[in-house]
Amino acid sequence: MRRKTVAAFIIVLCPVIFTFSQTVENKFENPDQEIDPEEELLTANYHYEFIPDFTYDMVKERINAMDSEMGFELNERIFAFIHYFAVRNRDYTKMVLERKDLFFPMFDSIMQKHDMPIEIKYLSIIESGLDPQIRSRVGAMGLWQFMPATGRMYGMGYNRDIDDRMDPVKATESAAKYLKSLYRMFGDWEVAMAAYNCGPGNVRKAIRRSGGKKTFWEIYRWLPRETRGYVPQFQAMLYLLNHLDEHNLHLEDPTYAVASREVRLNKAFNLEKLAELTELCVADLEALNPSIKSRFVPETNKTMAIRIPEARMAYLEENFSWIGDSLANKPTNLIASASLWNEENPGMPNREPLTYRVRSGDVLGSIARRHGVTVSEIKYWNNLSSNLIRVGQKLYIETDSPPNRTVATTDNNGNKTYIVQPGDSLWIISRRHSSLSVEDIKRINNLSSNSIKPGQKLVIG
């Protein structure tokens, strides 16, 4: 252990020594050259991590002092995995630390509800590294790595668009029920976890071969090889995450779960469309709903609960009617299409696109103002699902605007009217005329849906 630590220090210090020797050599080659005092000052920049040393006896003493429902006795196998996660593969442990606050509060709640030891939550670290969308080489999915058949047994279906095994709450509920049933079957949590990994049939076979022994370590040698390492890894992680200070494992920027609420839209819809209508980022919706694989909720899953950030729930509730009306199974294009404008207004000039390369400091709003268009139009022309752009990205912008693009007129009856332009939606028009809401525009114009098209005349006052 000490030999490895010394080697690490040598590797880090060598560049500093080399830089110093170069400076001294240059000084002797040019003795008359004046050297800036600031250049003579060498600042060593050490990039190393202190890994505290520990012994078997130290770890054994800490484990014996742990207040845990799933106490265990240290042995060489468990100690080897503790050394692995604390020293050789600290990056994996840090990754787990980054993710744990996203799921552990929910794990705790579900384990308590099912009257199970809270420590069972650490099993998900061994199963998936707390990645809700991870897939094993044999097809197991999600935080708790359910195979398709076992997932269906616990009500988790899947198709090409939705996989319930990747839903953190559904998967954890199912894992708790399955582990509880395995515990009732074998009467021991360690054996139940072994059965969760290799199946109850293999555990029964190991029990028979051992002569009827009942504990994990008594049947250890007759279990499949992978399972023999499964429970000791769980116990190593259980110890380590309860002794982070002793192993100098800390995070400067942990990740926390976004407060969210569930809503049932009872419609087939596209996640990008929902993001647009609720002014949310698609990536945020995907993170909250990892079971949606292709950004689309089909008709067969229309009753599924969707998690929405708490911060946007008030807006969704206030506008639920028109947002719901816009989420059709085969949604019409609620943003007016420039191609439709040209088809239905042949006398109007076509809009010639130009290519704009994004520069540092650009945002869609400033680019839109510079070219006399709207942000929604730029997003539509470039198939953008969010307002995020990157330096150097090419954007296509149509510059020759049709007449009366943003001008409202008054008809013979004194009504203020507006001609729908390419890129418009009812929401954009309502924002442009702040005295009206989407529902007001629909009521005044006797619209049954939010669908509009270029050239359509709307009364706005």
Image (tube, grey):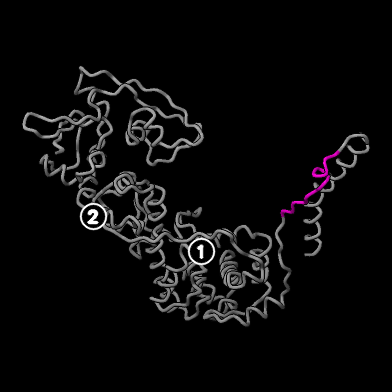
- Residue position marked by numbered label 1 in the rendering: 100
The reply to whether residue 42 is visible in this rendering is yes
Above or below 363: residue 11: below
Q: Which SS class for mark 2?
A: helix
The main secondary structure of the magenta stretch is loop
Q: Amino acid at mark 2?
A: Glu
- Residue 29 — which label? none
Left or right? Give the position of 237 relative to 312. right
Q: Position of residue 72 (x, y in %)?
A: 59, 79
Left or right? Give the position of 16 relative to 433. right
Above or below 78: residue 136: above
Mark 2 and mark 1: span between their CA atoms? 34 Å
- Residue position marked by numbered label 2 in the rendering: 318
Left or right? Give the position of 143 relative to 240. left
The stretch in magenta equals: 35-47
On whether residue 42 falls in the magenta region, the answer is yes
Residue plotted at (90% across, 39% down)? 25
Residue plotted at (23% across, 38% down)? 429
Above or below 125: residue 288: above
Q: Amino acid at mark 1?
A: Lys
